[in-house]
Amino acid sequence: MTKKFKTGLVIGKFFPLHRGHQYLIDTALKQVKELTIIVCHCDKYNIDPEIRAGWIRELYPSARIIVFRHKKYLDSTSVKLSPLWASITKKLLGFVPEAVFSSETYGQSYATSLGSTHILVDIKRKKYSISGTLVRANPFKYWEYLSEPVKGYFAKRIVVLGAESTGTTSLAKSLAKHYHTSWAPEYGRTYSEGKITAKNGNNWTADEFIHIALVQNSLEDLLARKSNKLLICDTDAFATRLWFERYLGYLYPPLDEITNTQNKSLYILTGDEIPFVQDGLRDGEHIRHQMHQRFIEELNKFHLKYILVKGSRTQRQKQAISAIDELFLEK
């Protein structure tokens, strides 16, 4: 299909990227052979520009993406700044784009200053009645306007963890079912089942725990994209640190570098008061309470938000649901 323009430009904060932005980019791609997208950033934006640029790169691999970090005074819609922005743009691109696509009132002034044709796209937001301001205020209210990579960023991650035979998997599954959302299974157990029949299957190395933690992180990231506003995690790399300590006898700093607790909204620790069930893989009841105490110690040490659930499955689920629901009421 013949394109109207050889080069085109879309510029914005994409803070965060939403369907309105995507409609703008899609419109530009239909009309230009080579599209450049500039992702603007200043210190007042709290989403890393490389993350925002990464979303766009993933969704639009044919576009050229440039991250531009600027001073706060340039974060303005005033047409008085159009000549300055045009000068900056020429230096960034190294050329003048034939067309500038925007959904903003200052778009014409900016394009004129550049010497480009301005293509105004859905300025009244009839196609997608959304804005970055609305999404930032409540991303969950406007969930339908977000693509999978952006959903993965905003999804609240809830981690269920605990000592052996304390019902973590059962609780994780029931919570995922309750919220009609995705859950990340415990990869370490799958790995353990796979190696247990091998010669020296009970021997563990540091590299194996690094592998388990990395895969667990990847599972979380992938399944968060499929989530219904929250992802339920059956353990995480934080817990993997403590299982390393259990089997090798010490904490391992390289695992700390892999562990990401900042993206976790809540940890749910399962109580060890229920009967122990041996399934062929577990250490035994003698070690269970010690592990339970280590989880409490480490959760407190790192000041992580957590609750302890006890009682029957129904009671535990009720306690967990109450805590999770509270997260969505927090400002």
Image: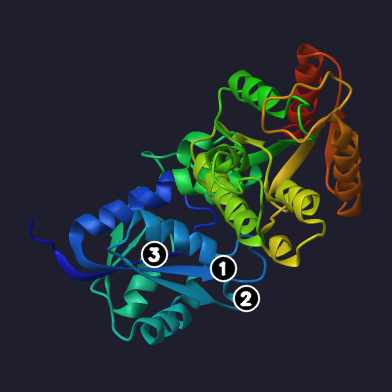
Q: Quadrant of residue 286?
A: top right
- Give x and y (percent) for residue 151: 52, 43
- Give the residue displayed 13% in from the left and 62% down from the top: 3
Label 3 secondary element: helix
Q: Mark 3 or mark 1, which has the lower sequence index?
A: 1
Does 10 sit left or right of 71 as displayed? left
User: Do the residues bearing badges 1 and 2 touch, measured as CB atoms within 8 Å?
Assistant: yes
Placement of the C terminus among the 4 image quadrants: top right
The residue singled out by tag 1 in the image is 76
Residue 107 bears which disc, if any?
3
Q: Which amino acid, by three-letter code, is at mark 3?
A: Gly
Q: Is residue 317 above or below residue 148?
A: above
Left or right of residue 172, residue 34 in this image:
left
Q: Nearer the viewer, residue 65 or 287?
A: 287
Please name whichever residue, 69 or 186, is drawn nearer the observer in this view of the structure: 186
Q: Secondary structure at mark 2?
A: helix
